[in-house]
Image: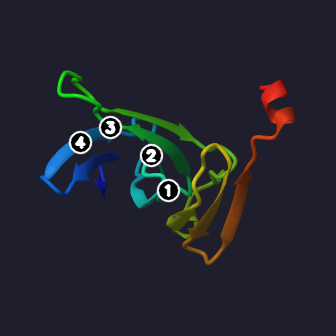
């Protein structure tokens, strides 16, 4: 995965040096840039952090056949992670993910030295309320 300052990413397959997908985060704020990204061990989910302290949890579905025209990437901005007043100290500098299938953990490091953790759960109570 390669990130660009315009808010886009390219997912590359290095065996054949091919671009598998291109995705642009259209809801980035003014002067907000991508600063960190990481894959889950399942090679489907990934997370992307920004200079404003936001984190996107994303899912990648590669092409399954030559007849398919596009890979699919879905992304959601995690509001509980975002900072209300971004500055240089709120930039995401690192992200670590477990499998998120759908349970998992996420550790996010910020430029000011703060580290936060989140845990996703799929208990039966959660499925009943969704």
Q: Which residue is mark 1?
A: 40
Sort mark 1 into few (<14), some (14-19) or many (20+) by Cα contacts within 10 Å.
Answer: some
Mark 4 vs 1, N-terminal side: 4
Residue that numbered label 2 is attached to: 44
4 and 45: which is toward the camera: 45
Q: CA distance from mark 1 to mark 2?
A: 7 Å
Report whether 106 appears left or right of 17: right
Q: Which mark is residue 62?
A: 3
Disc 3/disc 1 C-alpha distance (Å): 15 Å
- In the foreground, 38 or 62: 62
Quadrant of residue 124 in the image?
Answer: top right
Q: Quadrant of residue 26?
A: top left
Q: Residue at x 44, y 42 (%)?
A: 28
Give the CA separation, mark 4 to mark 1: 17 Å
Counting residues from the start of the chain, the first of labels 3 and 4 encountered is: 4
Which element carries disc 3, helix, strand or loop?
loop
Of the numbered discs 4 and 2, the one sitting upstream in the chain is 4
Question: Is disc 4 surrounded by few (<14), some (14 to 19) or many (20+) residues within 10 Å?
Answer: some
Residue 20's label in the rendered image is: 4
Q: Is residue 23 above or below residue 32?
A: above
Q: Is 70 located above or below residue 120 in the figure?
A: above
Position of residue 21 measured from the top left corner of the image (x, y, whole percent) = 26, 39
Marks 3 and 2 sit apart, C-alpha to C-alpha, by 9 Å
Q: The N terminus lies in which quarter of the figure?
A: bottom left
Label 1 with label 2: CB-CB less than 8 Å? yes
Q: CA distance from mark 4 to mark 2?
A: 13 Å
- Secondary structure of residue under mark 1: loop
Task: Indicate the position of residue 106 as horizontal and vertical percent values.
Answer: 63, 59
| Residue for point 15% across, 48% down | 18
Q: Residue furthest bottom?
A: 113
Determine contact: label 3, label 4, CB under 8 Å. yes
């Amino acid at each position: 995965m390669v990130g660009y300052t315009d808010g886009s990413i390219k997912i590359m397959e290095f065996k054949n040096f091919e671009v598998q997908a291109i995705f642009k985060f259209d809801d980035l704020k003014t002067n907000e840039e991508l600063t960190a990204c990481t894959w889950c061990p399942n090679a489907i989910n990934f997370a992307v952090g920004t200079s404003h302290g936001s984190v996107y949890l994303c899912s990648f579905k590669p092409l399954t056949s030559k007849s398919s025209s596009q890979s699919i990437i879905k992304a959601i901005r995690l509001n509980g992670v975002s900072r209300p007043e971004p500055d240089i100290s709120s930039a995401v500098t690192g992200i670590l993910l477990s499998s998120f299938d759908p349970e998992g953990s996420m550790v996010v490091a910020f430029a000011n030295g703060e580290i936060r953790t989140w845990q996703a759960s799929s208990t039966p109570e959660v499925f009943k309320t969704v």
